[in-house]
Amino acid sequence: MSRLRIASGLVLFVFAFFHFINIGLGLFHTDLLHGMQDGRKAVSRHAIGGILIYGALLIHMGLALISIARRRTLRMPFSVALQVVLGLLIPLQLISHLVQTRYAHEIFGVNDEMGYIIILMWPSTAVWMQSLLLLLVWVHGCIGLHMWLRLTGWWRRLVPYLIGAAVFVPGFALAGLLTEGRRLWMDFADPDLREQYIEHYDWPSPQEFDALFAVKDNTMMVFWFALALTGLIYLGRKYWRRRHAVRVRYVDGPEVVSEKGMTLLEMSRANGIPHTALCGGKGRCTTCRVVVENGADQLHPPTEVEARSLKAVSAPRGTRLACQIRPTDPVTVFRVFRPDGARDRAHASQGQERQLAVLFLDMRGFTARTTGQLPYDIVFLLNRFFDAIVPAITAHGGVVDKYMGDGLLAMFETATAQSSARAGLKAASEIGRALERFNQRLEAEGSPPVRIGMGLHLGDLVLGEIGAAKHAPRTIIGDAVNVASRLEAETKALSVELLVSDKALQAAGMQCDPGELREFSLRGVSELVPALPVKHAADLGSHTSPLEQIA
C-alpha cells in the first residue's frame, strides 16, 4: 500500500508541476500559456492519460483516508501532521475546480482553456482560493517527496538547490496567473471583446451554471461523508482497542491504559511518557530497557535479538527491552534510563547514535624526548605541534573531541557515514603533509623530528553530554573509539604512521591492494580487524583508489 501511495503521489506531483509551469508562462505571453496547455491536454485528455491521472487521484485520496482510519493514534511529527491537514484541505477547492473545468467541458462542451478559468475566477475571492489550492497542493507534494527520499545521500546533497526550486515554482505560477488575469480582465471589460470571449469559450448559461453548482455540492457531500466515515472508523477501532487494552504502571510515573499489540516503547510514546531509546527502537542500544516488577511471567520470552542485547550489558533478571515486548496483561515497569530524571539537562544529555569516522593520534617517544626539559618547553612544543596538525582535521569538517597529553581523539561529524569516512581519509593524509612541514622547521632549528602514530576507523558511536549535570562536555563513546585507539597502538610495532581500517576505506568508496591489508587482533575487540598500514600518512593516496577502478 505504501508503494501504491508513493506511485500515485508521483503521478499527481508531475501533473501539478507541469500545470503550475503552464500557468507561469502567462508571465511572458498568452500564446505560450495556451500552447503548453494544448500539449498537456493531449496527454491528460487521452483515454490512457485520463485513467492514469484520475485513477492516481482517487487512489491517493482513498489510501490517505484508509491510513487515517487505521492509525492507532493521532500523535505524529509536525511534518506528517501538516501533510495530512493539507491533504484534507485540498479537495475543498479541487472539487470546484474539476467541476468547472473538466466536467463542464465533457457535459456542456465548454472550452476550458486557461483564459476561461481565469476569467471565471477574476476578480472574486475565487482567484485567491484557487491560489491557495495551488500552494496546498505544492507544499503537500514537496513534503511527501522529501519524506520519501530524505534518507538517500543524493537527495540530501541536492536539498539546498531543491528548496530554491520549490519556492520558485509556486511563485512563478502565481506571477503568471496575476499577469494573465489582469490582461484578460481588461479585455473582458470591452463589450465587443467580451462577446467574442463568451462565444469562443462557449460560456455556460445560467441554467448550466446552476447544474454545475449542484454537481459541486453533491460531490462535496460525498467527500464530507467519506471523511466522516473515516473518523467513525478511527473512533470505532480506538474504542474496540480500548475494550481490549492493557494497563501499564510506571514506577515513579503515571499509570496508563494502552492498546494491545503495541510495544511498550510505542505505548510510552503514544501516551507522552518520556522513554529513552537512542537507537530508535531497534533493540541495539538497550537504553529503553525496563525492569518488569509485576507481570513478567505473562510476557513472551526474549527474541534472539533482545537476548543478545541484554546479555551484552549484563542486564539483571527481570530486565526487558521496551522496544521488543508487547504486553497483553497488566504490567508494572521501572525505566532504567529516565530522560526526565534531571530536568535541567539539555536534550544532548540523552545521546545520539551515529556512524562516524574517528581518528586517534599519538606522538611517538614523547617521554624520552621531553625528559629533563622544563614544563614550559614541553607545553610550547605540544602547542606548536597541535597548531601544525589540527588545521588539517578542521579543514575537512573534523573536530578534536579531546586532547590527551601528547595525543588527541578527533571525529568527523558529517551528514553520512560515507562523507565522514572520506573526510577522515583526507584529514589523515593532510596531517602527514603537515607533519613533514613541521619537521622541516624543527630540523632548521636543530631539533629532532616528531614521529606520530594514527588509527582511523569508522563505526557506531554515541554522541552526548557525559558527566555531572551542568558540567558535562559533549563527547563520544563506543567500540569505534576503542578500535581506533588499538589501531594507533599497533602503528608503533609496525613503524608506520597510519593504520586505516578496511571498514573506513569501504565506506569512503576506496580500495587498496588486498595484499597490503593486514588483520589485527585487538584487545577488547572480539573479531579480527582488517586494516591498511601506511608508512607515511602523506602517501595514503598512492595506496588507495576508487572502488570503480578495481581491475
Image (cartoon, rainbow, N blue to C red):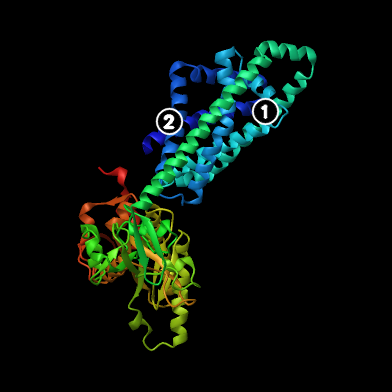
- Gap in Å between the C-alphas at discs 1 and 2? 34 Å
Q: Secondary structure at mark 1?
A: helix
Q: Is residue 8 above or below residue 375?
A: above
Q: Is residue 238 above or below residue 520?
A: above
Mark closer to the chain start, 1 or 2: 1
| 440 relative position to 295: left or right | right
Of the 4 image quadrants, the one containing the C terminus is top left
The residue indicated by pointer 2 is 59
Of the 4 image quadrants, the one containing the N terminus is top left
Q: Nearer the viewer, residue 250 or 500?
A: 250
Characterize the local packing of mark 1: few (<14), some (14-19) or many (20 or more) Cα atoms within 10 angstroms: some
Q: What is the x, y in percent for residue 79?
A: 50, 48
Q: What is the x, y in percent for residue 314?
A: 24, 71
The residue positioned 43% from the left and 18% from the top of the image is 48
Q: What is the x, y in percent for residue 117?
A: 64, 22
| 487 relative position to 253: left or right | left
- Residue 149 appears anywhere in the view: no
> Mark number for residue 353?
none
Residue 517: quarter of image: bottom left
Residue 112: quarter of image: top right
Q: Nearer the viewer, residue 213 or 109?
A: 213
Which amino acid lies under the numbered mark 2 shown in the image of this protein?
A: Ile
In this view, the residue farthest toward the front is 243
The residue positioned 33% from the left and 49% from the top of the image is 509
Q: Nearer the viewer, residue 389 or 129?
A: 129
- Residue 242 appears anywhere in the view: yes
The residue positioned 37% from the left and 54% from the top of the image is 417
Q: What is the x, y in percent for residue 19?
A: 56, 27
Q: Is residue 319 above or below residue 397?
A: below
Q: Secondary structure at mark 2?
A: helix
> Mark number for residue 27?
1
